[in-house]
Amino acid sequence: MAWSCTGTTNAELISNLLRNRLINSDSVAAAMQAVDRANYVLDKRHAYEDSPQSIGHDATISAPHMHAHAAELLLPYLLDRPAPRVLDVGAGSGYFTSVCYHLVRSSAQQQQQQQGGSGGDSTGTVVVGIEHIPALTALAEQNIRADGLSSAIDSQAIMLITSDGRLGYTQKGPYDAIHVGAAARTIPPALVEQLASPGRMIIPVGTYSQRLMQVDKDAQGTITQRDLFGVVYVPLTDRPA
């Protein structure tokens, strides 16, 4: 099914993801339509293929259907919140960081409009993308600016950090949603700690055999884990590795 989602344009790619029910919400469709994948891949000829692609440094940009899955799973924790916060660990090319920004901006605008505000970006809304390789942090910034989001970077509504993503980024937490784009050996305790109450993390876990895990923290701080399905991701490593 996933391979059948490949398109010749970004609009066709998203339309195919909708047709195959890999995207099920208007919010996720709008966010992914707003982010042109051609700005985030190295080989533009394959920008709209529903497949992972190398971005150098032994890193990849995930297949669009996996980004769609992640966005749909995180969406309930971004809706109806005045200033949602997202942590994107292993930001890579910056693609999913940008998708998350459009999701949180939409949520913030809806909240402001309901409260009689102007509908502009809400103060406190932030998406933090973390990479441990400086060249990838620079690539993500370059790509996000090319995709028309320079103002979001300049205002720090999008923040790009070079650090060990397994440790998170406490300065802007807690986070309503955490996305991890590389496979951890085990679920990093620091990321669970930085989840808001309530909050949700989507993370691939494992080495040779990997599973996509959903980690939820409820309003009382109770943690539950759900095994979603098998996946294949590059490993979440430290800088020397």
Image: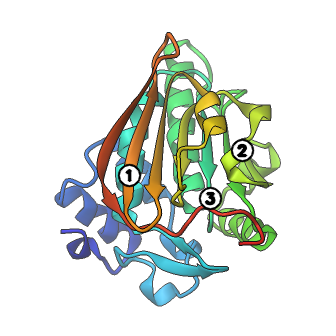
Colour scheme employed for the rendering of this structure = rainbow
Decide which of tag 3 and tag 1 comes sooner along the chain. Answer: 3
| Closer to the eye: label 3 or 2 | 2
Instruction: Report x, y in % for residue 136.
Output: 72, 70
For label 2, the SS is helix
Decide which of tag 2 and tag 1 comes sooner along the chain. Answer: 2
The label on residue 90 is 3
- The type of residue carrying mark 2 is Leu
Residue 110 as seen in the image, left or right of residue 89: left
Q: Quadrant of the C terminus?
A: bottom right
Decide which of tag 3 and tag 2 comes sooner along the chain. Answer: 3
Residue 4 as seen in the image, left or right of residue 74: left
Q: Quadrant of the N terminus?
A: bottom left
For label 3, the SS is loop
- The type of residue carrying mark 1 is Leu
Instruction: Name the residue that disc number 2 marks.
Output: 167
Q: Nearer the viewer, residue 87 or 222?
A: 222
